[in-house]
Image (cartoon, rainbow, N blue to C red):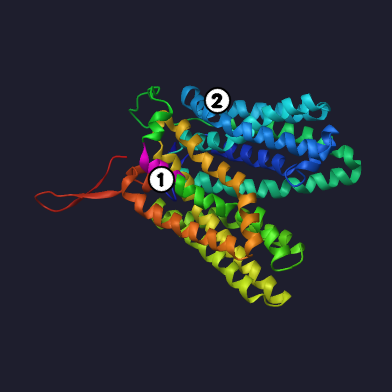
Amino acid sequence: MRKTAASGEAKVAGERSLLLGIGISSVGIGMYIPFSLVFFHHVTGLSLTVVGLVMTVTGLAGLAFMPLAGTAVDRFGAKRVNLALYGIRALGFALYPFASSLPAFAAVALVAALADRSFGAVQQSLIGEVARGAARDRLQASTRALQNAGMGAGALPVSGVLALCGAGGFTYTAWGNSLAFALAGLLVGRVRPVRDAGDAPAKRPTAGYRTVLRDRPFLGLTAANFLTALGYSALPVLFPLYLSTWLTAPDSLTGAAFTVNTVLCAAIGVLVAGRVRRSGARRTRSAALGALLFAAAFAGQIVLGTLRPGRTATLIALLAIVVVYTLGELVHSPSGGALSVSAAPEAVRGRYLATYQLSYSLASALAPSLFTTLLAVDGRLPWAVLAVAALGTALALLRLERHLPAEAVHAEPPVVLKASAAAPVPVTAAP
């Protein structure tokens, strides 16, 4: 890596290609995510019920595959596994239009789900493989901004294709998505892993996941992230239900909330993360601040659900709450992601991050049933649970701070004072 003149942060070899690849693949994801079940229904010709069942079963199978993906990262390197997953996703979407029978669709969907579920952990491992120190935080922020911008942009061409080609346009969309994954893989292939000067090649681990299970601070970090991950599920899952059932607000507000969230993430995500990074805040504390902002947004929903003002006041309050929620996301995500990557020992980073990624996957799987059950009791109850969970996350991060490695807590190595006969001399601690 090389240093930038302005900030002193290390630049990643092939960083532009890496980020461009992430952006292109996100455009591809945005081409089908908004349509989801309808997309696969039209591409394969199978009923919505069958498509939904297959996607649920294959998604759960994908969760079971994640530990194997972590092992593959530790054995072959994150870059190789990342490229393999891009290739599998490209092949899967190229084959979807030909998977018109149930067995064929199930087979293609299973292979694609294995790659999709594992991709987040592998990409996190790749960031750890190619970046050090504050560069990890910067890549985390840039990645999230590009993912939001790409997914938002991906929905635009699909609308045009469907307007011109009708339902047949879904087939062209599938092939377009396949092409996006293939191009992303070619671009990401240009990134170069980095090793610190004098580093010897990491030894292959012999203990496997037992090493992870013995690391109580990292397991605590994973458990804390599960609580935060429930909050990340609030906007796509709970928010629309809360609007329609408890506030009886127009469904169009859901689209407005998503637009505000996406635009802010894409427009100011890197700026907010850079401001946090330059402040010198410890990753544990900036991630805790993000959790507190989440808690404030959830508390705002409780107040709004109690007062239930008129439509205009509700609209203003909801948008303000979404802004606070998004700021929490922008502060927490880069620090939390870099914290998990840096807390994982290099030799078993794949296994560590596969374990950490399960906190997101489990939260996504549990959120729909949890939120609907609580919402049936009282519309404010799920927000109260989320607020308590976010406060618990902040407290847990602060308590874990002294138990996590120093290079994980600090984006840059901390400075210690070494006493001498003349005067204290600042010495940079070894990472």
Residue that mark 2 sits on: 80
Left/right placement of residue 431 relative to residue 421 reads: right
In the rendering, at what x and y percent does residue 341 appear? 45, 40
Task: Locate residue 375: give its quadrant.
Answer: bottom right
* Residue 275 shown in magenta: no
Contact check, label 1 and label 2, Cβ < 8 Å: no
Q: Earlier in the sequence, mark 1 or mark 2?
A: 2
Does residue 311 show up?
Answer: yes
Label 1 sits on a secondary structure element that is helix
In the rendering, at what x and y percent does residue 107 appear? 72, 25
Q: Which residue is rendered at x = 61% and y = 35% of the image? A: 117
Is residue 249 placed above or below 158 in the rendered structure?
Answer: below
Q: Which residue is rendered at x = 43% and y = 57% of the image? A: 394
Q: CA distance from mark 1 to mark 2?
A: 29 Å
Amino acid type, label 2 = Arg
Is residue 316 placed above or below 39 in the rendered structure?
Answer: below
Task: Locate residue 318: give its quadrant.
Answer: bottom right
Q: Which residue is rendered at x = 68% and y = 73% of the image? A: 314
Magenta part of the chain: 215-222
Residue that mark 1 sits on: 220
Alpha-carbon neighbours of circle 2 within 10 Å: few (<14), some, or many (≥20)? some
In the rendering, at what x and y percent does residue 137 appear? 47, 47
